Image: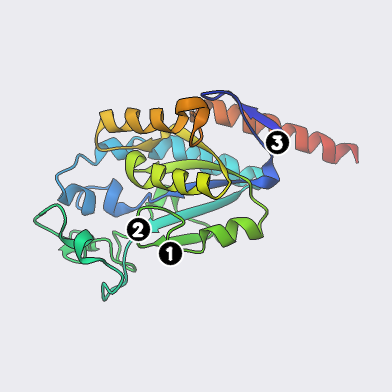
């Protein structure tokens, strides 16, 4: 069992029962020219999370942990896109409109896919979701339970929308969640801090919060312990 220095108190996990969840690291959100920028946002704030998330991703792969990626988006015919979601915000471009990287938030388009730095490798499930949460109208819960997963390590964007929505959904389904602060990002710094504060409030009402350095230190300790046990057999 590994222990991460976290808030509101230490987070414990075992390699075989834990999954890394990469929420919506999509070009449409992270890169200029995508859906995020079409709403008037500064995408560089999200790009800062990619480097730390990449280190965590590589380390979790090396440790043999399950890695799951999510993408928010809709069918090309937009049959799964509620009118309210499409029209809300009164933006110049809406979901499904043509952007610099293809139709915005449409499955199969270049912008809808995951950034190259964090791109899934063979064997890593990619969960396509029509909403903000990773569990709504997806097979996320089934994937986790079939693998015996009990703990989730969350990275992704944006913190106050898709990340914490997924954390709340995970909480209601009995999973323990750790959010890595520097591996998440928001277009609004004040929302970033408020969202993380809500996760860890009241003794961890939705989960725990830490950062990549503290998690990686705990992960390395778990790997060494696992290697030592294997060598002793």
Q: Earlier in the sequence, mark 3 or mark 2?
A: 2
Q: Which mark is residue 32?
A: none
Question: Alpha carbon of mark 1 to alpha carbon of mark 2: how far?
Answer: 8 Å
Mark 1 or mark 2, which has the lower sequence index? 2
User: What is the crowding at mark 2: few (fewer than 14 residues within 10 Å), some, or many (at least 20)?
Assistant: many
Height in image: 98 above or below 36? below
Q: Quadrant of the C terminus?
A: top right
Quadrant housing residue 14: top right
Q: Which residue is mark 1?
A: 137
Mark 2 and mark 1 in contact (Cβ < 8 Å)?
yes
Look at 52% across and 26% down and name the residue there: 203
Badge 3: few (under 14), some or many (20 or more) residues near its Cα, within 10 Å?
Answer: some
Residue sitting nearer the eye, 112 or 91 = 91
- Residue at mark 3: 223
Helix, strand or loop at disc 2? Answer: loop
| SS at badge 1 | loop
Identify the mark nearer the N-term, 3 or 1.
1
Question: What x and y, as percent, mark residue 104?
Answer: 23, 61
Q: Which residue is mark 2?
A: 131
**Depth order, front residue of 50/143:** 143
Taking the spot 33% from the left edge, 44% from the top edge, the residue there is: 161
| Residue at point 24%, 34% (across, down) | 188
Q: Could you give the CA–CA distance between mark 3 and mark 1, rounded to whole angstroms?
A: 35 Å
- Res 96 seen here: yes
Mark 1 closeness class: few <14, some 14–19, many ≥20 residues within 10 Å: few
Quadrant location of the N terminus in the rendered image: top right
Can you say whether 14 is above or below 105 in the image?
above
Estimate the x, y position of residue 204 in percent, counting from the top left.
51, 30
Secondary structure state at the residue bearing disc 3: helix
3 or 2: mark nearer the eye: 2
């Amino acid at each position: 069992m590994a222990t991460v220095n976290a808030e509101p108190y230490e987070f414990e996990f075992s390699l075989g029962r834990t999954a890394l969840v990469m929420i919506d690291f999509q070009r449409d959100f992270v890169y200029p020219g995508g859906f995020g920028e079409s709403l008037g946002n500064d995408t560089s704030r999200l790009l800062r999370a990619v480097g730390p998330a990449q280190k965590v991703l590589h380390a979790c792969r090396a440790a043999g942990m399950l890695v799951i990626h999510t993408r928010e988006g809709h069918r090309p015919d937009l049959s799964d896109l509620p009118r309210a979601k499409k029209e809300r915000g009164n933006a110049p471009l809406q979901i499904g409109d043509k952007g610099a990287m293809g139709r915005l938030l449409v499955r199969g388009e270049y912008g809808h896919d995951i950034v190259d730095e964090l791109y899934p490798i063979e064997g890593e499930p990619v969960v396509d979701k029509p909403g903000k949460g990773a569990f709504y109208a997806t097979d996320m819960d089934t994937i986790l339970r079939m693998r015996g997963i009990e703990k989730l390590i969350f990275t992704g964007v944006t913190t106050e929308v898709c990340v914490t929505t997924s954390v709340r959904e995970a909480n209601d389904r009995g999973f323990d969640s750790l959010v890595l602060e520097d591996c998440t990002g928001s277009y609004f710094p004040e929302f970033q801090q408020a969202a993380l504060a809500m996760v860890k409030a009241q003794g961890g009402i939705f989960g725990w919060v830490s950062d990549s350095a503290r998690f990686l230190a705990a992960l390395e300790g778990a790997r060494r312990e696992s290697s030592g046990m294997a060598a002793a057999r």
